[in-house]
Amino acid sequence: MDVQLADRRKAPALSAAPPGFEHLRRFWDPAQGCMTVKVLPGEFYVSGEEEMLSTVLGSCVSACIHDVRRGIGGMNHFMLPEPVGERDSWSSTVGRAARYGSDAMEQLINAILKAGGQRADLRVKVFGGGRVLARMSDVGQRNIDFVRRYIAAENLELVASDLGDVFPRQVQFFPNSGRARVRLLRRSDDVALVAGESGYLKRLANDPIKGEVELF
């Protein structure tokens, strides 16, 4: 084996996660030669390091946002566009995490700015929103409509998107460079994903937050 390739695949000591992101799964990926972070529904992650952020999307949407001058970026993963009902003091509750796009986008952008990013230099790539939950209303399209409205309303620059269709996606994002890769998962591969999304929706329904009326 080539010495350089062997060195690249050798796992270094696990570095500490950035403050606030200790709960996310991080591990060394020998194929990529870098740390990989799994971003699950309701989560987001921001870094300026040479890491890879990875997620799998069905009807969910992920926004990958990158500061092109400072090499800081991050990814979120949300299932539902916005809460239904009034927003009051509960809107800042930590327990909401990033379950809604309206919170997920704000939290991701604010975390990038806190890490040193500048709003004028942010570039956005968005992925997901497939119609994979056939028995339910098209939450994927609702997520797509929301994220497009949000980007336009916040005057953010959208540089790439891969949205809609009926296939789940695997997304890999490199926050330091802003590079993203997408792979469609064909229907025979998405059984576990659909079951996972259905289970996540059920957990949201069974753990309502004040002000929510309905999921669909």
Image: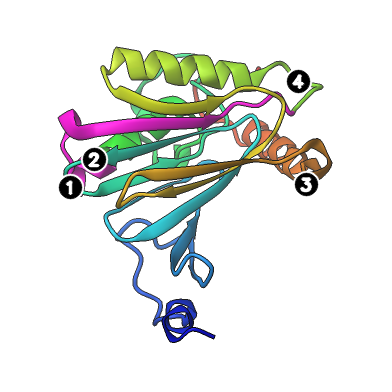
Amino acid marked by disc 2: Asp
Q: Earlier in the sequence, mark 4 or mark 2?
A: 2
**Can you identify the residue that label 1 sits on?**
70
**Magenta-span inclusion, residue 115:** yes
Q: Nearer the viewer, residue 7 or 85?
A: 7
Helix, strand or loop at mark 4:
loop
Q: CA distance from mark 4 to mark 1?
A: 41 Å
Between the residue at mark 1 and the residue at mark 2, the CA separation in whole angstroms equals: 6 Å
What separation in Å lies between label 3 and label 1 (alpha carbons)? 38 Å
Front: mark 4 or 3: 3
Check disc 1 and give the amino acid type: Arg
Lower sequence index among marks 4 and 3: 4
How packed is label 2: few (under 14 Cα within 10 Å), some, or many (20 or more)? Answer: many
- Proximity of marks 1 and 2: CB atoms separated by less than 8 Å: yes
Mark 4 lies on residue = 136
Task: Kindly state the secondary structure of the residue where label 3 is placed.
Answer: helix
Residue at (35%, 19%) from the top-left corner? Answer: 151
Residue 70, image x, y percentages = 17, 47
Which amino acid, mark 3? Ala
Query: Which residue does the numbered mark 2 point to in the structure image?
Result: 67
Render colour scheme: rainbow
Find numbered disc 1 in the image and state the secondary structure of the residue it sits on.
Answer: loop
Q: Is residue 15 above or below residue 175?
A: below
Q: Quadrant of residue 129?
A: top right
- Whole-Å distance between the Cαs marked 4 and 3? 17 Å
Decide whether residue 134 is among the magenta residues.
no
The residue pinned by badge 3 equals 192
> Number of numbered discs present?
4
Of badges 3 and 2, nearer the viewer stands 2
The answer to whether the residues at label 3 and label 1 have Cβ atoms under 8 Å apart is no
